[in-house]
Every structure is written in structure tokens, then in C-alpha cells.
Image (cartoon, rainbow, N blue to C red):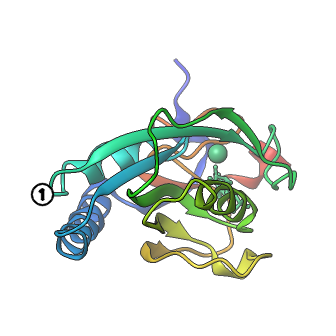
Amino acid sequence: MKNMRDDLESILYTEEALAEVVKQLGARISEDYQDKNLLIVGILKGSMVFMADLMRQITIPCDIDFLAVSSYGSGVKSSGEVRVLKDLDSKLEGKDLLLIEDILDSGTTLSYIKRMLSTRKPASVRICTLLDKPERRKTDIKADYVGLTVPNAFIVGYGLDYDQKYRNLPFIAVLKPEIYC
Ligand code: IMP
Ligand code: MG
């Protein structure tokens, strides 16, 4: 039987470590948005596992929506082109938007999305990313909430993929370079 674990170099964050980080983010967001009109927007597909855990750690009322974009193809580097595959269902006017991302890498994807959504007159737009790889940034975008700052390695699991695989690992791991080289 195939085992995804054979393709991994090391485990970077365990399920328990991730749960603690997500709990703390949920508490901060609940505190900061208590008098606001919070709409959390998951950027598909990478954020789905993080979003599902984070929303259950948010204790104030909030709406949820999803935006599907594609910028990667099957490589490990961003193509630099962002395509909207599924737009939001919600009207944004007056909403306090919190964009939920799995990882902020070059910043191309989030810069594009933030610019696009800001034209729809939300009350505010902020970013919450589980992981931040600041070494790789090519734009001046910053996340307002960061779970963990990660080294410059290609990582998978907990929603993050390589060529659409490994999203279902319950932890975050470094992929063996021979898998994508
Ligand atoms: P950016 O536009 O370069 O910031 O890319 C952001 C997107 O690239 C994320 O939402 C991920 O889907 C993907 N990505 C960036 N780094 C990694 C990684 O190390 N593993 C898996 N996906 C990644
Ligand atoms: Mg991805």
C-alpha cells in the first residue's frame, strides 16, 4: 500500500502544535472583531483545513465565504498569474473581511485578491495566514495575523499541496526534494 509519509523529509508542525496556534489566532480574532461585521473568506483550496479549524475557534458571530483562485499550476513556484475560479457569493459592502490563507509566499496571490476585493467597498480587509515565508516575498504585502513563520522549504499537509496531493496529511511536513525535482 502507498504511504504518503514515505515522501516526507521531516515533520515541521504536529497536529497538536497546529491546534494550539489556531486556538490562539481564534482568540485574537474574536477579541479584535467583537464590534465588527466579520466575514471570513477562505482562499481555496489550500486554506480549507485551516479555515475549518479556525472558524470553530472564533467565538463571535461571523459569516463565511470562499474564493477559489489558481496561481501555481503543478510547479513549486508561483506562475505569477492569478485566475479567479470561483468568486464570492456575498455582497461585501459594509463587511469586515478577513482573508484566510494557508501560506503567504511571494505575496502575488494575496496582493491580487486584496486589490480586487477592496474595490467592492468592504468596511475593512485584513489577512490571516497560517504560515508566512517572508524570505520569498516579491510584493510589499503583510499579513495582519500570522500563525507561524516558516523556513524557505516546500511544505505540504494540513491543506497545503504539491500537485494537488498531500492536503490530507493532518500535520505539516517538508517534502523530499526528489519528489518535485
Ligand atoms: P504566493 O502568491 O506566491 O504568495 O503563493 C501563495 C500560494 O502558493 C499559497 O496559497 C499556496 O497555495 C502556494 N504555496 C506557496 N508556498 C507553498 C509551499 O511551500 N507548499 C505548498 N503550497 C505553497
Ligand atoms: Mg496551493
Which SS class for mark 1? loop
Seen from the viewer's position, the closer of residues 147 and 141 is: 141
User: x and y percent of residue 178 in the render?
Assistant: 79, 48
Seen in the image, is 70 located left or right of residue 91? Answer: right
Check mark 1 vs ligand 1: CB closer than 8 Å? yes or no: no
Q: Residue at x 29, y 44 (%)?
A: 63
Rendered image quadrant of residue 22: bottom left
Q: Residue at x 81, y 54 (%)?
A: 78
Q: Residue at x 23, y 64 (%)?
A: 26
Q: Is residue 170 visible?
A: no
Q: Residue at x 28, y 58 (%)?
A: 37
Seen from the viewer's position, the closer of residues 83 and 179 is: 83
Q: Is residue 113 above or below residue 67?
A: below
Seen in the image, is 1 located left or right of residue 85? Answer: left
Seen from the viewer's position, the closer of residues 18 and 25 is: 25
- Dot 1 amino acid type: Thr
Residue under numbered circle 1 = 59
User: x and y percent of residue 55 in the render?
Assistant: 26, 49
User: x and y percent of residue 124 in the render?
Assistant: 45, 68
Q: Is residue 112 visible?
A: yes
